[in-house]
Amino acid sequence: MILLSDRRIAELPVADNGEPLVDVRTVDGLRVDGRLADADGAYAHLREGVVDRLLSAQRRLPDGLRFLIVEGYRPLSLQASYFAEYRDRLRSAYPAWDGERLHVEASKYISPPQVAPHSTGGTVDLTLCTEDGAELDLGTPINATPLESADRCFTAAPDIPEAARRARSALDAALTSAGMINYPTEWWHWSFGDRYWALQAGAGRTCYGPVELA
């Protein structure tokens, strides 16, 4: 399992193709959930190419299912805050862990700000819902931590209900077919064009670098 703390990710060259951020709330056919809404609407923005891939992938879902987008773009300052907060929670829970262990374990749930996939606009946290918006059970709540879910948030976790496993498989098949890559400790986290994608896809460099919301 390759984690975002892997130094190969930080060493990848960063390029940016200049694609704009798109407010997904304005895109016909994609449903956006407001649980992580912020005043600037940053959470609802993704790169244009990612939006196109989501629309393509959604057409490959089983009948009656749609994506429910929870978070896209995340400012770097917020990413750094999230990482520090979770690392401090782990430090309190596991006082014997040294700094390197804390960094690795924290990166299973929150990306280190040095690589920050959400801050490129190329990463999306999403789940599945029915046509009328009822959210499916995929085994854990979205954004469940490894600590609180006993690692059931891992995409391939074996000890989840069969219906949740089928739902995860449907999510995986649709998004993989559109060229997106999953972060294996978070079933909901998918990306295209960021450093993690570039390493896993053998692309050599990114399509997207960190970007500011205009």
Image (cartoon, rainbow, N blue to C red):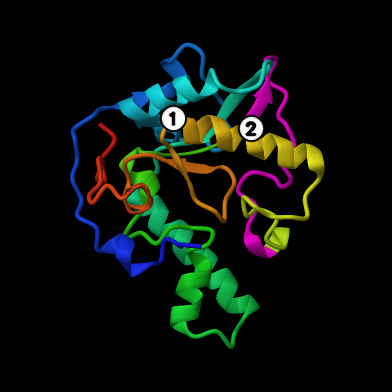
Looking at the figure, which quarter contains the C terminus? top left
Looking at the image, which is closer to me, 175 or 110? Answer: 175
Horizontal side of residue 117 vs 83, given as left or right: left
Q: Residues within 10 Å of mark 1 (few under 14, many from 20)?
A: some
Residue 157's place in the image compared with 18, above or below, is below
Q: Which residues are magenta?
A: 128-147
Looking at the image, which is closer to me, 92 or 158? Answer: 158
- Residue at image coords 59%, 85%: 95
Residue located beneath label 1 in the image = 178
Residue 15 % position (x, y):
18, 45
Residue 173's place in the image compared with 99, above or below, is above
- Residue at image coords 44%, 36%: 72
Residue located beneath label 2 in the image = 170
Magenta-colored segment: predominant secondary structure: loop
Residue type at the position of mark 2: Ala
Of the numbered discs 1 and 2, the one sitting upstream in the chain is 2
Horizontal side of residue 174 vs 196, given as left or right: right
Residue type at the position of mark 1: Ala
- Residue at image coords 64%, 76%: 93
CA gap between label 1 and label 2 equals 13 Å
Looking at the image, which is closer to me, 83 or 146? Answer: 146
- Residue at image coords 32%, 46%: 194
